[in-house]
Amino acid sequence: MPQIEELVRNIVSKTGADRENLLPILQEVTRHERYLSEEALTQIAKAMDISCAEVYGVASFYTFLDTVPRGQNIIRICKTISCYMAGKDKIVRAIEKKLRIKLGETTPDNRFTFLATNCIGWCHKGPAMLINDKVYTELTAEKAVAALEEYL
Amino acid sequence: MTKTDIINEHTKKVNLIFEDCNCWDIIDKVLSMPPDAVLSDINASGLKGRGGAGFPTGLKWKSAKEQPSNERFVICNADEGEPGTFKDRQILHERAHKVFTGMTLCAHTIGNVSKGYLYLRAEYNDLLERLQKDLDEFNEGLKARNFPFTINIISGSGAYVCGEETALLDSMEGKRGEPRNKPPFPTVSGFKGKPTVINNVETLVYCTMIMLIGPEEFLKLGTKDSRGAKVFCISGDADVKGIYELELGMKVDEFVELFGDGDTKAVQVGGSSGHCVPRKKFSETFLGFEGVPTGGSMMLFNSSRSMYHVLHNYLEFFQEESCGLCTPCRIGCQQLLRGIEAVKRGEKPSTYLDELIAMARTMRIASKCGLGQSVPNPFISIVENFREEIIY
Ligand SMILES: Cc1cc2nc3c(=O)[nH]c(=O)nc-3n(C[C@H](O)[C@H](O)[C@H](O)COP(=O)(O)O)c2cc1C
Ligand code: SF4
Ligand code: FES
């Protein structure tokens, strides 16, 4: 895919190909593509003149750098203790029902991927979730569904 | 007086972190002081790191300063991944200038610092745009003062272990966020092998405030081993939740009286990696370095909660967040989790819990970094105090 090659080349020419720029590069490609395909990882390795294994090793270490296909919008619901106690299971069920997918899956129209994540720093206002970078707190089933509708 | 009034009394007494102040006045004052004088003020305040480990801040700065080098770095740790902790986010949201100011004071004190970095966790990306705008202004202000120091933001990508200072350094260098061997400590060999001070967001704001109010005022707060105040994050079964700055040295029973829902059976102090304090020990436990040290997370549990589920949730967290580099932690986290599940299902006798505790003790001494070393904190304190709930 020449598009990816071009995207990677553009990004690397902006950040520079120094080793310490690998994370910003991976983050930027993820922002554009939603995930890091094999092709993208290979192109990054080539542009930075390091091995593919090295790039994959770094990418696969970080939760927010996905190496499997993801939808346009990524929902990450907090599953850690305070949100769990505040009733995150009910929110998970409401979202699963609305999107007709299970936690961990992507909708067939590729609009949403629904994931669980660890504490996102809103424990006093749980249940909490992120949609892309945006935070939603003190969720009820209704509020969660309304949040999804912003992206439909 | 209502509970709210009492809480207000407490927080009014120590309003240091969220109080607005003119940072440029502080910077101008400090830049005109000899670095050694600043260091001696920070030392005299008795300030200890607020990121969890509680290392004396003055000593840390001194160590980096004494390390011969023509280049040093200052890093603010805003990775805040410890479950139950959400203060750094609020500080950066409301008072980012005071954080940048603390970094600048440190740069002036240790010398030869031209670059500072703020490592912000990916979960806080919504703060990025505004922080960057504030930071651009701030960097301009430093330039206008001819102080050759600029601060940059580095974004994390979702890994709890990157809050560990040496993993953070590797992550900043574009690698997997795996902890390094210590020593050498970052103050000797940190970012790019240069002497580096890494401080928590809150620690840096206290440095700013100590330079404003003077170390004597700071010393008046807290206890002998825990000087000053601390921002607490309260969540779980609490009537009053949120972020409160309190003097250090409060007893857990007083804390629970103020914030709890009247039925508190346990408080997890210091997040998942902290200690669980059961009701019978509330009156003898201090919040501070001489009692239970804390990065600020206070999770309250009432009698409707099963401590088995609490521990299970913590262990799942650690199993996922362990970087997998060393065997005691990688395998230990898995086995502790499987172990309590097996006991719960009756596949293992209750005495198996003692074997698990012994294994947890081994993790404490054999794990490479603070993550694996602190898994035994919640494990042992919960299993010992709530054994029946784990078994039945
Ligand atoms: C697994 C792990 C995660 C950590 N996460 C953080 C963190 O998110 N923020 C932080 O300030 N310190 C964190 N620390 C502590 C840092 O390693 C370091 O001690 C601290 O940033 C030093 O700052 P201070 O002296 O100002 O407390 C973590 C430690 C470990 C072992
Ligand atoms: S203790 Fe755990 S997190 Fe730390 S280095 Fe070992 S495996 Fe990694
Ligand atoms: S436990 Fe969900 S945000 Fe902290």
Image: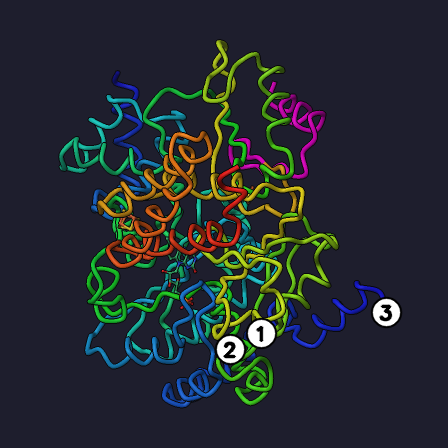
Give the class, few, some or many, for how many residues have Cα within 10 Å of label 1's Cα (few <14, many ≥20).
Answer: many
Note whether A105 is above or below B352 in the view shown. Answer: above
Q: On the image, numbered disc 1 is attached to which residue?
A: B248
Q: CA distance from mark 2 to mark 3?
A: 28 Å
Image x and y of residue A95, in percent: 60, 21
Q: On the image, numbered disc 2 is attached to which residue?
A: B226
Amino acid type, mark 3: Met
Amino acid type, mark 2: Ser
Residue at x-position 47% and y-position 53%: B384
Q: Which residues are magenta?
A: A129-152
Identify the subunit bearing mark 2.
Answer: B
Name the element at disc 2: loop
Q: Quadrant of residue B286?
A: bottom right
Q: Are marks 2 and 3 on the same chain?
A: yes
Give the mark nearest the N terminus, 1 or 2: 2
Q: Is residue A139 magenta?
A: yes
